[in-house]
Amino acid sequence: MPESSFFAELRKRKVVQTAAIYGAVAWGVTEVIVTVVEQLFLPQWVSTLAVISFVVGFPVAMFLAWTFDLTSEGLRRTTVTSRRGKASIFLSLLLLISGTAGLFFLIKPAIRENAADSVSSPASAPPNSIAVLPFDNAGSDQDDLYLSEGLSDELRDQLSRVPDLRVSARSSSVAVRQKGLDAPSMAARLGVRKLVEGSLRRQGNILRVSVHLIEGGNGLTLWSETWERGPNELLNVQQAIAEQIVQIMLPEAEPLMVEPATRNVDANDLMLLARHYELQVRDRQVTDVNLLLKAIELYRQATEADPESALAYSRLAGALLFLGDLEAAEAPINRALLLNPNLSEVQNTVGEIYWARGLPEAGPAFKRAIELNRNNVDALSNYAFLLWLSYDTPVTKLDEVESYFRRALELDPQSLSRHAALGEYLGKYARVDEVKIVIEGIEELFDNAESYRLISWLNELIGQSDKAIAWAIRARDLEPDNPDHIGWLAELYAVIGDFKTALRLEPEPGVGLLFRMRRYQDLIDAAEFLMIDEPEDIDLRYLLAFAYTATGQFEAAIHILGTTGLPDSVMNGVPRSVSDIEGLITLDNALAGVGTEETTAMAKSMAQWNEDAGWWGDIGWIGLFRSCTLSILGRDEEALNELARVKESPRLRRQPFLRDLFCFQKYVDNPIYQDVLRDQEERRRALRERLPVVLAEFGVSLQSTASPPQ
């Protein structure tokens, strides 16, 4: 047998002994190199290169052991004694190749991770960049957690207000801490040079606070100090830490005093606890109303303890706004403005309240917030979205919009929402390759159902609905009890025209699926009932109005849209979302559908405003909504030319808009319109045919759950 001959040759040529000796030597030398790299702070690629060298050297060593013998007469070529030696040579080569390949794939993930970290290594980060990691609660009492985390949060906010510092956002700092990485890896993931770590322990009536400023590139401690103070002195400790860090980070700058949120001890403790509860709510996908109300009450008590704290009032307003109580939020934010309008957090909350009301003053407030604090990622993201949606933002300024999205992501690279914002922006402008880069980044950084849902949505945004379905199944398999995953999956099957599967997934379809399926009477019945329990849901009203318009109930559509604030909320203010613009288009169609002289004039006036506003920079609206607007204006040739551009969009257009808007009804028999409908249906059919292959490639199945991707 070739096998027995092969093993006989292995024993004769001492290949096994050589492999064992090679492995032991390689392991020992690698351990020494790793230790030296860590102690001398050499680059991590030195260790990686050593491992690769030993792997590449393995087949060479085995070939030499097979081919030559070390004898008393020197190195001699080994002769083949077995009658089946040639077959054994072939088997040995196969074994060497397989073994080397196996070793390579074994270390490949570590090599990729090391390469990923080196792309954004601390050495390439700005010298003035820093991240404040969540402080550890070193005591045994979990009730003190709000103090340790609150101290780090307040310190981060305080440092972020220093003009020349670049401070990583809270969500990313928390995320890398939770992954248990070493200091260089955390600094690389955050793109910063320095890290602040700390701990807080309560010992009776004494708080023991330890802080370390760490060099991100090598993990060395640059400065550390420990304080033992009473609880009433925590504010002084925070101030001392901030001043010392600023002095080390900016040694040549003039001494700069950045005030904390409050100087009142009682107010500070209340605000720390309130923020602890509020952030728990904001960090979760499902809002805990009771916990949020507890935070709101604590913020109110903080404003009573320190009536001069603008940030106490601002955070109270922000929590009320998050709760949805816009009216109650106005009094505290107005008080915050009177106390100190030059705080970025105050201006951002002002902007959010203005935006919620559709007021144009939101833009200047967000811009002012950024001017006051370039590290305010919420203001950066808010301003980017607002500029993007604003009718008075020319296409030539879209680079500025993108820069704000990218700046927010740079400061908050571990935040899924920042990746989502940039991906949505790029996707709406059909920048497919750049969206794919965003998706790759999400895959590398996140591994949970929420990230799978986001990747699914971004794939749908660029017309890859088959991949979107595969990722949605992965999300469902990871969280099979989450109904949102099932609803989204059903909508995706409706997108590609597979309504049978969509209904199997969601036998009692929600309004979103009913809209996709163009079952307007069922949508009307469901939406009218839901409005009783959800009177503040604006998007629900928009869907209901569209269903009224599609079924010829134009007056009912005009009435329901009037309750949303349209058209004034858009034409005299700023859109609150893309849905506001779609609602305006629906209103325009309803007015045109009524057909009286008065409503026709109103529809044309609104259509002309839409045309002048120039929403059409978004390729998703090019050809569809602009075509509709031109149709209402009676510019039919231009309207049909724009309609043909629907075929340029990688994303499938929603069938209700394309088929059932009043403005397109006069084109039903037009060959250009029919060609667009044909193109959309052919693309849907191609996606349905390709879907089984894609699901097999992803290793998922609609019928049964599968293991999450590795």
Image: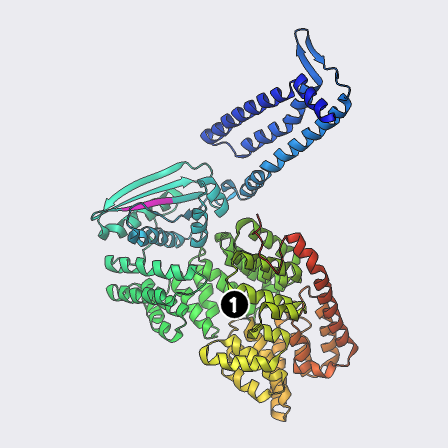
* Res 252 seen here: no
Residue appearing at x 56%, y 75% in the figure: 511
In the orientation shown, which residue stands out farthest toward the left? 205
Where residue 479 appears, as percent x and y from the top left, is 51, 58
**Splitting the image into 4 quarters, where does residue 106 fall?**
top right
Q: Looking at this view, is 293 or 388 the one in front?
A: 293
64, above or below 637, in the image: above
Overall secondary structure of the magenta section: strand
Q: Which residue is mark 1?
A: 386
Say what secondary structure mark 1 lies in.
Answer: helix
One can see residue 628 in this view: yes
- Towards the viewer: 498 or 432: 498
Q: Which image quarter holds the N terminus?
A: top right
Q: Does the magenta-highlighted stretch encompass residue 496?
A: no
**Range of residues picked out in magenta:** 197-201
On the image, the x and y values in percent for residue 463 come to 67, 63
